Structure formats: C-alpha cells, structure tokens
C-alpha cells in the first residue's frame, strides 16, 4: 500500500511511503522517508529512514497519519487544516455486501522493504469480502457484521465508548473498499461526507440524546442507496453502536424507483423529525415498559428506541422501505418488525 | 310518564355531550404520557412548577456572559405520534456574549414561527430523572448539531443550575453542505449557576 504523494515533496526533497505487510500472523506497518537526490529516489541506507513502525498480532490494524503526508484523505476528500486520516486494514476482507470491492487482504504480503514510493491506489486492496448466494436483508447483514472489517469497526466503537474518553466516532465503508474514519467532524457531529462515495457507515452514540438512528441518519442511508446504482440500492446500510451493548443496522429495502426524490427532505423537515424524536423520548421515558435503569440512570430500552425509529420512518414516508435489524453480542441478527399496536417484535435471522 | 322519559333523554344527551367535550379536550397533568390520552388533550402545569423559572437570568461560562430569557407558554400546540396535543411549556431564548461584547450567538429576537426551529429550547416536563428538575430539549443549530437535553434545577428563588447534554448527530454533504456553521455555542456543562436579573 502506498500513500498519496505530497505535492510539495519534490521541492522539499522528501517523499514518504507507507507499507503494510504480514509476517507469521503479525501485521507490520512502517512509514519510510526518502531523501531525494536530484529529485530521484536513491534506495540505500543513506537516503531512506524509517520514521514510524508498528507491529500488531491481530487480523486488523488501525493506521493513523496526519494530513500533511498528502493533500487528500484516503477517501479522496480534501484535507482541512492538519487533520488525520485513520484507515482500518484487515486480513479477512471487506463487508460481505460489497463483494470484490472489499478491503481484502492487506497488500504487501511479500518483503517489507519498499520497492519505491508511489501514489496510493485504493484498488490495491484486493481480496474482497465474501459473496452471498441469497441477497436477503438477513443474509446481507449477517455477512456484514461477521466480516472482519466490520467486527473491528464495531469493536473500535465499543472500546471508545467503554474508554470513557467521550465524543463521537464514525467509520465510512467506502466504495473503494477502504474503510476509513470520518473526517472533518465537529462538536458532537460525525461527518460522513459525500454519500456518493459510500457503501455504508457506522457511528457511535455517547449515551446522551436519542440512542437510535436520527432522521438525518436515515436520509444519509437514502442518499447512499440512491448512488449505489439501480441494481443494488439495497446494499446501502448504516450501523449504530450505543452504550449498554446496543447495536443496530438499518438497510434500504426498496427498489431504485421507490427511493424518495432528490431533495425530498428539507432541512426544516429533518430538524422537525429529529426534534420529535427527542420529545417522544421524554414521553416514552415516563412509561416503565420502555425504560431500564443503567448505572443509576433511566434510559430507553430497545422497545422504546425501536418505537421512536418506526415513528420517524412513518413520518418520512419510509415505512416498509427501511429495515431495522438488531445485532446481539454474538453477532446474531434479528429483524425488528413493527406491530399494528406500535409495539415491536424481533424475528431472528436464521 | 312522557315527561319522565323526556327528562331522562335530556340527561342522556347532556351526558353524551359532556363525554364528547371531554374527549375533545381533556385537561391532564403536565407529566402524564401522551400515550395514555386522546388527541387534543391538554397537559397542564397544574402545580405551577414552571412559574419560578420565568424571567431574565445570567450566568458565566468560559468567560462568556450567557443571558437566558424564559417565558411560560400556556396550552402550546404540538404534534406527537400523529396526534395533536397542547402543553404548558417554558420557552428559553438566549444570548452568548464574549467579555469584549461580541455576541457569538443569540436567539433573543427569534420568534420561532413557522418551521424555524433553529436553536430552540423548550421544556417537555419536569422530574424525568429526579425531583426538582425541569426537563427541556434543545433542537440544535444547522443540521440539528447540538440537539440534546437540558436540565434546570432550582437552587433558590434567585438561582438555578443548568446542565446540557448534547446528543450525537451525523451529517452528509447533501443534507448538510460543507461551509455551514456546525459549532455548538451553548455551554456544554453541568450545574452552571444562573442568577435572576
């Protein structure tokens, strides 16, 4: 794997290259610094320095590097200021839905010595996720959540919640096959950027506010589905990890023709629906059947959260077009159905 | 005999009309759940729990002077679960001013009419988690960034504490174009003391 070359590298006489390799189950990552001679790379010890090196024994490694190593993040979006890009590279392939587009095995299984610097090419991900023979929402999500990359993302989000550091994190499952952390986030807000570039996304909630997908999350799902092409809008997904072990996925489950028109949801509507979620949360919080006490604090249980989501979907005109799925700690998947009386029933995916 | 029948019939009609009227607008306690009542129910602040918060208040957070202008709105209409209801509620307008006098954000002149819900703070009841608290929601700024819970707790007749817990929001470039202001200006803290002016 190689980095995007830095535009100003030639004038500074330096060039950087990131390599990832696997050796006896351990994954190694290194950043090499080349001191150019007359603008050319000289592959000897005097001209190559290892400026960063790390080895991990797991299947996945997380790589964080600052923007100044390139002018663009790995997903192609422009760096703003001196931010960072975080990539997740796993040995087991990408999300199952994406088939050959999955992140795949980290390239560079061979020697760790760089053969030379060059531009980053997402297609080098190779490998790919598992394919499914039965493309139902159940099989898609089962493949998604058991995929190595997704498991690493979910673990990262859960670990972040447990760490108590606070704050929100998000991961983008890019169409390039690379899974990258969201960038340009702001106060308590995760920025998924251009949905055209995504197959899906995951983010966490910190335990304050409404711990289910907002109207904006749902709108993001719709936009991802819209740009997934006529043949596969149902591949779009959004995942959510919240405290107390709660993990949900939503999927678009309609045809391309049944998608809401572009611009169908105004900012005012989205805000109104998000606000109604907050009001409904306070209403449900007064009913014991929708609450539980965790660490001394009364919070909505799954029934309460699911009721809020279905109410929002109905307001957005998306009833029966978006599927809610609950993921248990063993990665078993259930489809959540809304009953006529407003209650919900979990139907396990077999 | 005929007079008695007419009298009974009149009573039944009155009873029916009374029931219809009752269904049309039933006044119940502010903290009752909308799930238990029909459309058009009025959730009233029967014990005047909100009254002591009405007025102008000031607090200081990170050097900024925060002014709150709190009014009580009676029988405010709202929609929930596809039904229309009414509730007594506090509406909170605010201004954040730096020590140099620069106003970083203000809703003091907002009328929140129509669909304008930006930076709107409204109470949804009291004592949701513990006694002596007013529970409010903040709708957030652009793309709902900052939407979350606000809690007031009375300290004395002239002071109350403010706690604000923003929830998580997400954005995409289509619904939330880059370049808009996505900063949260409200004081994200617990137990910030406000004093009546």
Image (cartoon, coloured by chain):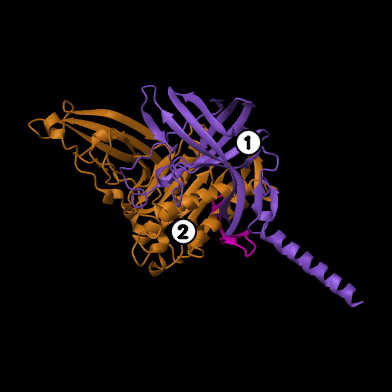
State which region is magenta: A326-350
**Is residue A68 toward the left or the right of residue B50 in the image?**
left
Q: As drawn, which residue projects farthest toward the front? A: B3
Disc tally is 2
Return the residue nearer the eye: A262 or B187.
B187
Place of residue B178 in the rendered image (x, y in percent of width and height, measured from the top left):
31, 45
Q: Residue at x 24, y 35 (%)?
A: A69
Q: Chain drawn orange, letter?
A: A
Judge whether residue A286 can be spotted in this image: yes
**Is residue A110 toward the left or the right of residue B162 in the image?**
left
Place of residue A244 in the rendered image (x, y in percent of width and height, measured from the top left):
58, 42
- The relative height of residue B131 versus residue A104 in the rendered view (above or below) is above
Name the secondary structure under disc 1.
Answer: helix
| Tags 2 and 1 both on a single chain | no
Return the residue nearer the eye: A246 or B48.
B48
The residue that mark 2 highlights is A251
Q: Residues within 10 Å of mark 2 (few under 14, many from 20)?
A: many
Q: Residues within 10 Å of mark 1 (few under 14, many from 20)?
A: some
Q: What's the chain of the residue with tag 1? A: B
Q: Residue at x 48, y 56 (%)?
A: A250
Q: Which mark, residue A200?
A: none
Place of residue A60 in the rendered image (x, y in percent of width and height, measured from the top left):
41, 42
Q: What's the chain of the residue with tag 2? A: A
Name the secondary structure under disc 2.
Answer: strand
- In the picture, the quarter occupied by the N terminus of chain B is bottom right
The residue that mark 1 highlights is B51
Q: Tell me, what hue is chain B?
A: purple
Separation of disc 2 and disc 1 at Cα?
46 Å
Judge whether residue A112 can be spotted in this image: no
* Circle 2 or circle 1, nearest the eye: 1
Place of residue A292 in the rendered image (x, y in percent of width and height, measured from the top left):
66, 44
Q: Quadrant of residue A228?
A: bottom left
């Amino acid at each position: 794997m190689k980095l995007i070359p830095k535009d100003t590298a030639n004038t500074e006489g330096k060039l950087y290259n990131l390599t990832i390799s696997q050796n006896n189950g351990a994954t190694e990552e290194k950043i090499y610094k080349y001191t150019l001679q007359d603008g050319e790379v000289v592959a000897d010890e005097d001209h190559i320095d290892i400026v960063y090196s790390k080895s991990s024994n797991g299947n996945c490694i997380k790589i964080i590097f600052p923007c100044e190593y390139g002018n663009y993040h790995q997903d192609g979006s422009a760096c703003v200021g001196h931010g960072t890009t975080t990539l997740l590279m796993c040995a087991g392939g990408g999300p199952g839905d994406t088939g050959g587009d999955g992140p795949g095995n980290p390239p560079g299984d061979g020697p760790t010595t760089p053969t030379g610097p060059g531009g980053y090419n997402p297609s080098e991900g190779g490998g790919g996720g598992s394919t499914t023979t039965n493309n139902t929402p159940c099989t898609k999500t089962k493949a998604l959540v058991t995929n190595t990359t997704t498991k690493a993302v979910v673990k990262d989000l859960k670990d972040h919640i447990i760490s108590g550091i606070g704050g929100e994190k998000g991961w983008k499952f890019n169409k390039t096959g690379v899974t990258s952390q969201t960038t340009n986030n702001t106060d308590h807000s995760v920025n998924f950027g251009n949905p055209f570039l995504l197959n899906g996304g995951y983010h966490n909630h910190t335990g304050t506010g409404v711990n289910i997908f907002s109207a904006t999350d749902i709108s993001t799902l719709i936009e991802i589905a819209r740009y997934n092409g006529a043949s596969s809008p149902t591949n779009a997904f959004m995942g959510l990890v919240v405290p107390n072990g709660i993990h949900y996925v939503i999927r678009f489950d309609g045809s391309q023709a049944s998608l809401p028109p572009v611009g169908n949801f105004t900012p005012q509507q989205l805000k109104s629906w998000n606000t109604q979620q907050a009001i409904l949360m306070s209403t449900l919080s007064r009913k014991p059947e929708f609450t539980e006490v965790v660490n001394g604090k009364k919070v909505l249980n799954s029934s309460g959260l699911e009721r809020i989501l279905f109410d929002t979907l109905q307001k957005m005109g998306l009833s029966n077009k978006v599927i809610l799925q609950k993921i248990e700690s063993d990665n078993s998947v259930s489809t959540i159905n809304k009953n006529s009386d407003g209650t919900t029933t979990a139907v396990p995916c077999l | 005999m005929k007079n008695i029948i007419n009298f009974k019939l009149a009573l039944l009609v009155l009873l029916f009309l009374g029931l219809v009227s009752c269904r049309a607008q039933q006044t119940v306690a502010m903290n009752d759940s909308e799930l238990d009542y029909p459309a058009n129910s009025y959730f009233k602040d029967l014990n005047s729990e909100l009254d002591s918060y009405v007025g102008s208040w000031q607090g200081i957070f990170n050097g900024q002077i925060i002014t709150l202008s709190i009014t009580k709105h009676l029988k405010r209409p709202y929609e929930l679960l596809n039904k229309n209801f009414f509730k007594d509620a506090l509406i909170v307008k605010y201004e954040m001013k730096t020590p140099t006098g620069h106003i970083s954000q203000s809703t003091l002149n907002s009328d929140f009419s129509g669909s304008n819900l930006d930076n709107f703070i409204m109470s949804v009841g009291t004592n949701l988690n513990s006694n002596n608290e007013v529970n409010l929601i903040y709708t957030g700024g652009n793309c709902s960034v900052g939407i979350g819970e606000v809690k007031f707790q009375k300290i004395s007749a002239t002071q109350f504490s403010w706690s604000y817990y923003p929830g998580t929001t997400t954005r995409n470039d289509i619904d939330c174009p880059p370049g808009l202001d996505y900063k949260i200006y409200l004081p994200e803290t617990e137990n910030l003391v406000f004093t009546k002016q």
